[in-house]
Amino acid sequence: MPLFIVLTGIIILVILIGYFKFDTFISFVLVSTGIGLAEGMEPLAVSQSVQDGIGSVLGFLVIILGFGAMLGKLVADSGAAQRISDSLIKAFGRKYVQWALVLTGMIIGIPMFYSVGFVILVPLVFTVAAATGLPMLYVGLPMLASLSVTHGYLPPHPAPSALVNDYGADLGLTLIYGLIVAIPAIILGGPVFAQTLKKYNPKPLKEFYNPNIMSDEEMPGLGISIFTALLPVIVLGITAILKFFVSPDTPVGYIIYALSDPIIAMLIAIVVAIFTLGINRGKSMTEISKSLNSSIKSIAMILLIIAGAGSLKQIMIDSGVSDYIGDLLRDVTISPLLMAWGIAAIIRVCVGSATVAGLTSAGIVFPLIEQNGASPELMVLATGAGSLMFSHVNDTGFWMFKEYFNLTVKQTIKTWSVMETIVSIAGLLGVLVLNLFVG
């Protein structure tokens, strides 16, 4: 009966969001409340559980996502994103332009939210395609594969950051493992798959083909652009490795462990970016502050969606459903990594949102970590990979791709949806292989 109630609740959640287009945050709270009451919880206990779930999630993520949005905004507004992409394209040349765009997508995609990176970098694709004479999707899909994979796999993006918190994973290790898994997924879904798309050469709509190109003098240098954009990755990656060799009880270990905290790493990156991409570029603190403030508006709804998912997770814990599901799955022989991917993939296809799919799955499968000894970091990646599965008409990313590239729905499914499916399956295979060595 508890499992039937949960499944019914998730079906209702899918219908509310996918069919009726009901507000996602309100849908989560309604379904969470309904599941709690149906499971026999007292109304006041349900209310408290919803509050606890929202509070526990936002306590960590408000800072991480807020800093991530700020860093992405500074990278974009300063011209650092354009400098990185322009330099890579010049270095690689026409023959290897796909690989230049893959690297651009990864570098820009790590600190920047998907929708922001998409809007900023797609005009670059149009420019490169026009300059090289290459088919537009052949040029653009590798970059979008990079953006999509970093969005689904790597902190500080919303779903991976929340999953790190939910699963109790180490953020630095998740980032290292995520990069290992992401690279082959991007290669398969990007340059390899794009080889089959040369017959598609749509013309972008004119309103999307007016990029704001900065002059060389207006942009910061390449070195400082890459360093600032990737500073959180650099700090977390280095400290994750150094933690294997130092004790937290030593003075050096104390510093390394402090820097390995994602909030500290992101704070350092923001302060550095304010100087390197703001003050040193002649901007006043008033201008910088306005830019930082505007960046927060882009994540307000994302935070509410994540908060709603947190309430569902907490209801499942407090009502005992998670323990019940854990007992049912205790003797199941299927890999918890495969199960996490499968559940996330199903919810993704039904709901459309990768963030919702990942966070909803976490509430169902997280008991498997303790029961089966699964690596929390790999569980994050398996769930993230599943959350990218087969984007279609209920996903905003699908429609952004369709409209910007001026494709039909059928063409979008054959290109964008297939690419998302490839990176999802490749991510799962990468996680399973990596599990042989670190699981």
Image: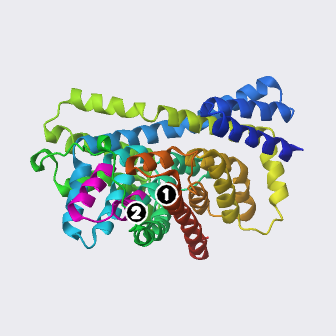
Q: What residue is rendered at 45% in x and 70% in y?
A: 193
164 to the left or right of 67:
right
Q: What residue is rendered at 69% in x and 47% in y?
A: 363
Q: Nearer the viewer, residue 226 or 341?
A: 341
Q: Nearer the viewer, residue 53 or 355?
A: 355
Q: What residue is rendered at 52% in x and 40% in y?
A: 60
Picture coordinates of residue 188 (x, y %)? Answer: 47, 71
Task: Note whether 118 is above or below 248 in the view shown.
Answer: above
Magenta highlight on residue 142 = yes
Would residue 227 be visible to someone looking at this image?
Answer: no
Q: Residue furthest left?
A: 217
Do callouts 1 and 2 mark residues in contact (Cβ within 8 Å)?
yes
Picture coordinates of residue 9 (x, y %)? Answer: 77, 39
Q: What residue is rendered at 38% in x and 43% in y?
A: 116
First reached walking from the N terminus: tag 1 or tag 2: 2
Q: Which residues are drawn in magenta?
A: 121-144
Which residue is the site of mark 2?
A: 200
